Image (cartoon, grey):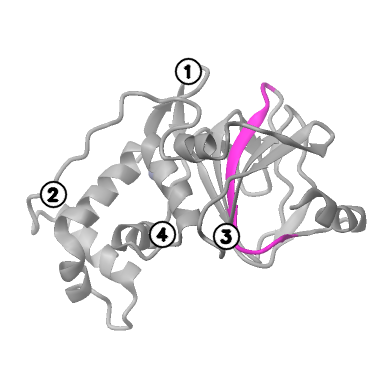
Amino acid sequence: MRETADGASGKRQMIEHHLDDDMLVHYSAGTLAEGWSVAVATHLALCPACRSNLAMLESVGGYFLQREQGDNGDVSEGWNNLKARIEAGEIENVLPMKRHSADPTFPEPLRSYIHGAGGLKWRRLGRGAAHMIIPTDDSTTTVRLLKIPAGQPVPAHSHDGSELTLVLDGSFSDEVSTFRRGDVEMADGDLTHQPKANPDRDCICLAVTDAPLRFRSRFMRWLQPLLGI
Ligand SMILES: [Zn+2]
């Protein structure tokens, strides 16, 4: 299913890359660390499809989810069973969730986090790129805003842990796909990619990581501690 969101430019854009069910289940259960939760909640503010998935999850409750857990105890399998039953009309009273009307570049809760950090303060990374660390109480993740100038690549890197990137303005493309406002890309150790901002405008993303990025270039690895990435 394709959903639309108003872009910062006012143009209607398609959200094609969504949160995975597993992340939504943990968010709903309150077991997701704060860093990831900031990105999940910000995506939810932009994405009616994931909001209605979450509404389904919340309206049936954790008790039911546990009963529906797969034989191997996999919560996401339980969620798939549950969705199938809701879609088959076996479960009713699933509450619809209202679409948020305001759609600024930095939706809540992200806006409050930026405000709490003293407002937007970009720190230069070189070649026009900049970042801003967003403080949270979660020591297991790093949350940052990343600005990539129009048409510029981010240095090629892979991941020791996981990386969630949520596009807030502009768009980027990598070996996997093109990601526009509202789109989420999840990357882990299996993916080496070189995201490149598309030429029409600067790309601003929210990025959450739970380990430092692994850069391919030796120069970038040398620079990494100085840049704080
Ligand atoms: Zn979504």
Identify the residue at horizontal 45%, vertical 37% (top origin).
Answer: 112
Which mark sits nearer the N-terminus, 4 or 3?
A: 4
Mark 2, residues whose alpha carbon is within 10 Å: few (<14), some, or many (≥20)? Answer: some
Mark 4, residues whose alpha carbon is within 10 Å: few (<14), some, or many (≥20)? Answer: some
Residue assigned mark 4 = 23
Say what amino acid the circle numbered 4 marks: Met
Answer whether residue 87 is visible to the viewer in this image: yes
Numbered tag placed on residue 11 in the rendering: 1
Residue assigned mark 3 = 141
Spatial distance from mark 4 to mark 3, Cα to Cα?
15 Å
Residue 106 locus on image (x, y percent): 49, 31
Identify the residue at horizontal 30%, vertical 30% (top origin).
Answer: 100
For residue 37, side relative to residue 199 (left or right): left
Residue assigned mark 2 = 94
Q: Is residue 63 above or below residue 6?
A: below
Spatial distance from mark 4 to mark 1, Cα to Cα?
29 Å
Say what amino acid the circle numbered 3 marks: Thr
Which numbered disc, 2 or 3, marks the residue closer to the eye? 3
Which mark sits nearer the N-terminus, 4 or 1?
A: 1
